[in-house]
Amino acid sequence: MKKYLLALMLACGAGQANAAFDVVALGVNGGVEEGNLTSYLIRSDDQKLYLGLDAGSVLPGIRKALDKGSFPQVTAENAAPLTPQGEVFRNLIGGYFISHGHLDHLAGLIISSPEDSKKPIYGTADTIGTLRQHYFNGRVWPNFTDSGSGLRIGTYRLNQQRPAQRFSLGLTGLDGNIYPLSHGGTPSSMILVSRNNASFAFFGDTGPDEVEKSKNLDTVWRMLGDEMKAKRLKGLIIETSYPDGVPDGKLFGHLTPGWLLKELGYLQGYAGGEGALNGLTVIISHVKPSLKAGADPEKEIMAQLEKGNKFGVKFVRMAQGDKLEIK
């Protein structure tokens, strides 16, 4: 019996050591193009349900991801009577975390809500209040939530979470901790999702502390530094909206490559110093498209990040519909 228990404990430990996350990009941009706005799905590789990380573009991203084979578990046969798109949307997304109340982070959730299944939405008090008062209020859009004004349809259960307090993310098998961010005068937030001994960080829009006159990112870096020392942090999604050269006064609560690299330097310090970030996956999100002829801000941003990458991190720019396994 003792040998059996020891083998079981070792097996469980080995499973935790190999914990991984599946990330699917439903939308990767910020700004003006409505069909590809910030929205990701994440799940633990031992769970069925995904957590939505913001919801700027939902159904268009699911369609693109199906086209790319990013949901191999879904077929026309096993999705029936729904379409494969409907199966992912209604039955594989177990809830949403919304980082803040700007439209490019929740428009897809609002527009698609009449066809959604019941599920929870998580956010800060400010974000949940914005959803309740300014969107799902029976005037801008029918109230598909369980609280607020007008007829309450009740599709979404609104859950406001206190900062830095761990909570369960519904039926996804994930836990979450939310931390405040500063976004040009708008409260924003990041979430650390965790499962067993693995964690992953998703940042809503944020400016650098130095420009925002804030300590919010510093608080996050200290926490993530501890996650890295404990070898739990598998990766993060963070915005870089503009190439270098945009004046600080025109950032409106966003990051450039130069600012992100400087902020990652602080994370490295809290994680143990030089070499501590080597191999960390950093997914770049919320690039603002340009309407200027010949401009390619995505290419410019990624080149600037790679040029300044003295940390050994793996900068990744996912395209809409891409799937990435992070171990």
Image (cartoon, rainbow, N blue to C red):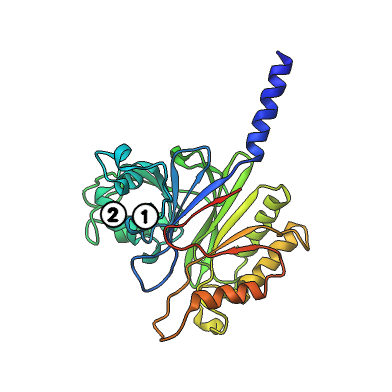
- Which of the 4 quarters of the picture holds residue 264? bottom right
Residue 19 image offset from top left, x and y in percent? 61, 41
Local SS, label 2: helix
Report the residue at 43% width, 76% height from top. 289
Relative vertical location of residue 187 with respect to residue 87 in this rendering, above or below: below
Which residue type does callout 1 highlight? Asp
Q: Quadrant of the N terminus?
A: top right
Which residue is painted at 26% across and 56% down in the image?
A: 137
Mark 1 or 2 closer to N-term? Answer: 1
Residue type, numbered disc 2: Ser
In the foreground, 288 or 267? 288
- Judging by the rendered image, the residue that carries numbered circle 1 is 67
**Identity of the residue drawn at 69% across and 56% down:** 225
Label 2: how many residues lie within 10 Å, few (<14), some (14-19) or many (20+)? few
Q: Is residue 14 visible?
A: yes
Please, is residue 293 above or below residue 104 in the view? below
Q: Is residue 284 left or right of 274 when viewed as pictured?
A: left
Reading the image, the residue beneath label 2 is: 112
Q: Is residue 45 above or below residue 216?
A: above
